[in-house]
Amino acid sequence: MSEIEKNKQIITEVVVFSAEGAIDAQKGGAQRVELCENSTEGGTTPSIGTISIARKHLRIKLFVMIRPRGGDFLYSMNEFAAMQADIEYCKKIGVDGVVFGILNSNGSVDTHRCKMLVSIAKPLSVTFHRAYDRTSNPEKALEDIILCGFERILTSGQKPTAIEGKDLIANIIKQANGRIIIMPGGGVRKDNVIEIKKRTGAVEFHTSARTILKSKMNNPESSFIESEILGTDISLLKDFVDTLNELT
């Protein structure tokens, strides 16, 4: 295990899709949240109102997704400009970190643009998100991301879930050798986090603990179907955190 893993406590990061979800994640024992919108798109940049309310109520670390749309990670000039503006706002309002990733059309890391955004984000913490799982050469991508100045990579090991990708995660943690944090994410749950921890040696874990909240609408004349409202299951998250704490 590298020095960076030895010297860090185990961290639970929870992805949330609302300010309310972020507040509940704090109640559940998370040390950090990744705040997004649009769960069906895999997460996009939340509104300034959502960010500001979350910042107001959170004592734990607040990281914000910087992703102008769903889909791939190859962005136009205007999309890139929007990412810059969103990072500037996050700095202004006092968030703790931002989460983004940009690729070239061949699946390599767009180091030029990523370096620009990392520079704009300073002194915020910067995470390269699961765009890593779409890179064509994970070993080279790791080196490129380190050179760009990112602090961590969120990855499922280029598989649908981190438990399936645990071997690659273990390999890149070894390759990184303490130069960057590798954080498993994607289907990380109470029933598999111990196995992932033992196989990879990771010290930061990304989970969702999401739940579907029942709508409080009671209008009998309403003929439309209510959309799902995502929330954070406090009890489920507490169980996850307790499971990790048993390893310390």
Image (cartoon, rainbow, N blue to C red):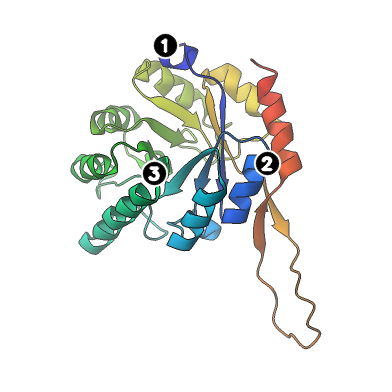
Q: Residues within 10 Å of mark 1 (few under 14, many from 20)?
A: few
- Residue found at the far bottom of this picture: 221
- Mark carried by residue 27: 2
Question: How many numbered tags mark residues here?
Answer: 3
> Is disc 3 surrounded by few (<14), some (14 to 19) or many (20+) residues within 10 Å?
many
Compute the Cα span from label 3 to label 2.
22 Å
How far apart marks 1 and 3 lie (CA) works out to 24 Å
- The foreground one among 59 and 163 is 59
What residue occupies the far left of the structure in this picture?
Answer: 112
Circles 3 and 2: CB distance less than 8 Å?
no
Residue visible at 48% across and 62% down? 49
Q: Which residue is mark 1?
A: 3
Identify which amino acid the numbered label 1 is placed on.
Glu
Q: Give the mark nearer the N terminus: 2 vs 1.
A: 1
Q: Looking at the picture, how far across and down is residue 134, in whole percent?
A: 38, 43
Eyeballing the image, is 104 above or below 174? below
Q: Position of residue 138 (x, y in %)?
A: 35, 31
Residue at screen point 37% across, 50% down: 90
Q: Dot 2 lies on which element?
A: helix
Q: Amino acid at mark 3?
A: Val
Would you say residue 18 is visible in this rendering? Answer: no
Q: Is residue 146 above or below residue 22?
A: above
Q: Which mark is residue 98?
A: 3
User: Residue 167: percent from the left, percent from the top?
Assistant: 50, 23
Q: Is residue 85 left or right of residue 4?
A: left
Q: Nearer the viewer, mark 3 or mark 2?
A: 2
Foreground label between 2 and 1: 2
Amino acid residing under circle 2: Lys
